[in-house]
Image: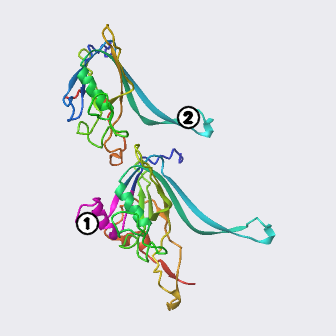
């Protein structure tokens, strides 16, 4: 019987950034107070035809995907979180400051090269042994909600993970084969 | 079932210049110094679908019997094509070279902005892709449909580019025109030619469905427009 209960286990979140950051090697970010939510965002485009009434398509086109990952960090390394925030703000040198408007997070360079401002987001899976690695993630939407008070802070962060491609042409293959996630952790 | 969804796929725009653009390409860093031709270069990828719009000109042959508006027959005249694209991931140096050629000034300076002067024939009576011919052969790849476009004599036309400058990614709106170029010596006087040669448009090509790099790029005479008879005898 191949089916069974799927228990991920204690899900340590680790991150890795470019060679010029404080997270240039795989670094623990922290533990979540509840389940980490991984939500795929698939994009399909209807091909509408008058012969089908124009509203329900006889076929659709797949137009890539992204993944949203949300977590409430409770046992967290604030310095590591700050590094992730700085990268998501365009690679700003100082926490709280922005990079110039229009900075392209990929920087036109390969993953983890200097100038690449995405973060490799890794979630361990000690029980199920099926970890997650998101190749190019950044904090976005409501990227961080940080309650401050006498109780422990549960910092809610929202990541978006995209199929980053240095060359979208891919020598004629386009986005084919560009990874968003896999199940091998960064080292 | 012969019909189906027509999906071109990722469309890379490529351009082919004449030899006179080699020093410009080297000065701009597009070509390494000493790198030989051919000047087949990738221009870039479009933000939106690239629009290919042939334009065919017809003239009515009227007869009074058919009233003032009816036309029992039409004459098909020459045609051209417009190609519109909004380049989003592109080589701005190659785009600058295209703009130089469109202004008839290709090869005269490193950057576009100068003009060679008015009333100068773009083709200068030379075969396509020869040094001095300012037309560009422009190709649009078709990796999925495997049916590319190749516009043999194209140039950025009318309002050739619109380049927004700001903090967002610059999306360059480009308008091309492709014509059925015939390499006619503009200074030849057919009346002085004892055989009374005339230019004929039959067989002139605006576009074909070949890959831009498929011909022998070292020998532009293999281009369809550069071979065969382009000036024929009058009837």
Residue B33: quarter of image:
bottom left
- Image quadrant where one finds the N terminus of chain A: top left
**Residue drawn at 29 percent across, 32 percent down:** A87
**Residue drawn at 34 percent across, 61 percent down:** B40
User: Can see residue B38?
Assistant: no
Q: Which residues are magenta?
A: B14-42
Determine which residue is flagged by label 2.
A57
**Residue B23 lies in the magenta stretch:** yes
Q: Secondary structure at mark 2?
A: loop
The front one of A70 and A51 is A70
**Residue drawn at 28 percent across, 63 percent down:** B27
The front one of B233 and A179 is A179
Residue A130: give x, y in percent of width and height. Answer: 27, 21
Residue B92: give x, y in percent of width and height. Answer: 36, 55
Question: Is disc 2 surrounded by few (<14), some (14 to 19) or many (20+) residues within 10 Å?
Answer: some
Disc 1/disc 2 C-alpha distance (Å):
51 Å
Residue B86: give x, y in percent of width and height. Answer: 46, 50
- The disc numbered 1 marks a residue on which chain? B
- Image quadrant where one finds the C terminus of chain A: top left
Determine which residue is flagged by label 1.
B36
The front one of B63 and A90 is A90
Question: Is disc 1 surrounded by few (<14), some (14 to 19) or many (20+) residues within 10 Å?
Answer: few
Please tell me whether mark 1 or mark 2 is closer to you in this view.
Answer: 1
In the rendered image of this protein, does residue A107 appear above or below residue A40?
A: below
In the rendered image of this protein, does residue B80 appear above or below residue A61?
A: below
Residue A32: give x, y in percent of width and height. Answer: 30, 15
User: Can see residue A117?
Assistant: yes
- The disc numbered 2 marks a residue on which chain? A
């Amino acid at each position: 019987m191949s089916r069974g209960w799927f228990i991920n286990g204690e899900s340590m979140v680790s991150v890795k950034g470019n060679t010029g950051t404080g997270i240039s090697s795989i670094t623990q970010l922290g533990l979540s107070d509840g389940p980490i939510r991984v939500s795929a965002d698939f994009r399909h485009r209807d091909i509408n035809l008058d012969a089908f009434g124009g509203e329900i398509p006889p076929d659709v086109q797949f137009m890539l995907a992204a993944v949203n990952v949300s977590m409430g960090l409770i046992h967290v390394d604030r310095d590591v979180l700050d590094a992730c925030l700085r990268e998501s703000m365009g690679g700003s040198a100082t926490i709280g400051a922005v990079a110039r408007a229009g900075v392209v997070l990929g920087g036109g360079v390969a993953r983890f090269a200097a100038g690449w401002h995405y973060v490799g987001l890794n979630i361990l899976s000690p029980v199920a042994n099926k970890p997650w690695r998101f190749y190019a993630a950044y904090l976005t939407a409501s990227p961080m909600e940080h309650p401050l008070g006498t109780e422990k802070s549960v910092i809610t962060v929202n990541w978006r993970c995209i199929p980053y491609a240095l060359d979208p042409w891919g020598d004629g293959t386009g986005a084919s084969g560009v990874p968003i996630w896999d199940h091998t952790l960064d080292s | 079932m012969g019909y189906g969804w027509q999906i071109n796929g990722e469309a890379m725009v490529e351009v082919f210049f004449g030899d006179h653009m080699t020093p410009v390409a080297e000065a701009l860093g597009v070509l390494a110094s000493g790198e030989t031709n051919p000047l087949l270069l990738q221009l870039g990828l479009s933000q939106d679908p690239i629009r290919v719009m042939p334009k065919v000109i017809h003239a009515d042959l009227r007869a009074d019997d058919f009233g003032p508006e009816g036309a029992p027959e039409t004459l098909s005249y020459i045609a051209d094509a417009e190609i519109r694209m909004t380049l989003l991931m592109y080589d701005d140096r190659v785009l600058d070279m295209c703009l130089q050629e469109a202004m008839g000034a290709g090869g005269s300076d490193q950057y576009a902005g100068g003009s060679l002067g008015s009333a100068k024939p773009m083709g200068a009576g030379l075969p396509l892709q020869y040094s001095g011919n300012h037309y560009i052969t422009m190709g649009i790849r078709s990796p999925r449909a495997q049916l590319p476009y190749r516009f043999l004599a194209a140039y950025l036309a009318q309002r050739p580019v619109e380049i927004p400058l700001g903090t967002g990614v610059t999306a360059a709106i480009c308008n091309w025109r492709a014509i059925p170029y015939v390499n006619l010596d503009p200074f030849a006087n057919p009346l002085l030619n004892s055989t009374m040669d005339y230019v004929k448009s039959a067989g002139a090509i605006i576009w074909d469905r070949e890959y831009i790099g498929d011909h022998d790029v070292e020998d532009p005479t293999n281009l369809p427009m550069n071979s065969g008879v382009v000036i024929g005898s009058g009837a």
